[in-house]
Amino acid sequence: MARRVPPGKGIMFCLCFSCAEQGSGPSECMVNSPTDDPHLDAAARTVAAQHELVPWMDRLWQPQELKFRPLPGEMLELLRTSADFTMPEAGRPTLLNLAAENAEAGLVVYLHPVSRELYAMVPAAEAS
């Protein structure tokens, strides 16, 4: 589990998922819209069963409004080079808290147990 970092001691960066760039809001329920990956589907169901609200950056969302997407390479590289980051346990959704000088953000990440790719729960795109 990621630990909280004091303000001014964390990582500052921009997340560039296409749905966030376009300002799209959630459109369909991730839990009722399975992916082609049983691991991601199971992780999404776990989060939805355990939490009424989950963070995506500076806002709380219902888990059904989010879905797993691969973490962009630039963000993954920033995380890997940070002394504050520990890779989550594979196959287990994990809350990651980020802090910067004047801001805090959170997101749920998931290390795929087969591909070892890191995913984040992000708002579902208007057009999937």
Image (cartoon, rainbow, N blue to C red):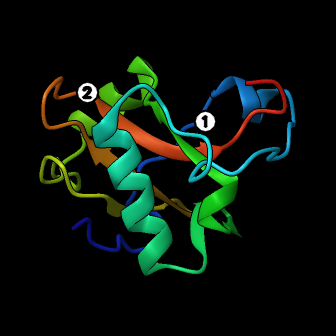
Neighbour class for label 1 at 10 Å: few (<14), some, many (≥20)? few
Residue 34 image label: none
* Residue under pointer 2: 117
- x and y percent of residue 80 in the render? 22, 35
* Residue under pointer 1: 14
Up the image or down, 49 lies above or below 84; here it is below
Quarter residue 24 falls in: top right
Instruction: Give, as a three-letter code, the residue at label 2.
Output: Glu
Q: Is residue 7 visible?
A: no
- x and y percent of residue 58 in the render? 67, 64
- Return the disc, 1 or 2, that comes first in the chain's sequence: 1
Eye-nearest disc, 1 or 2: 2
Quarter residue 82 falls in: top left
Identify the residue shown where x is 42% and y is 79%: 50
Up the image or down, 73 lies above or below 117; here it is above
Quarter containing the N terminus: bottom left
Asked if the residue under mark 2 is in contact with the one under mark 1, i.e. CB atoms within 8 Å, the reply is no
- x and y percent of residue 118 in the render? 30, 34
- x and y percent of residue 30 in the render? 61, 48
Neighbour class for label 2 at 10 Å: few (<14), some, many (≥20)? few
Q: Secondary structure at mark 2?
A: loop
Up the image or down, 105 lies above or below 41; here it is below
Nearer the observer, 3 or 69:
69
Instruction: Give, as a three-letter code, the residue at label 1.
Output: Cys
Q: Is residue 115 left or right of residue 74?
A: left
Q: Is residue 125 visible?
A: yes
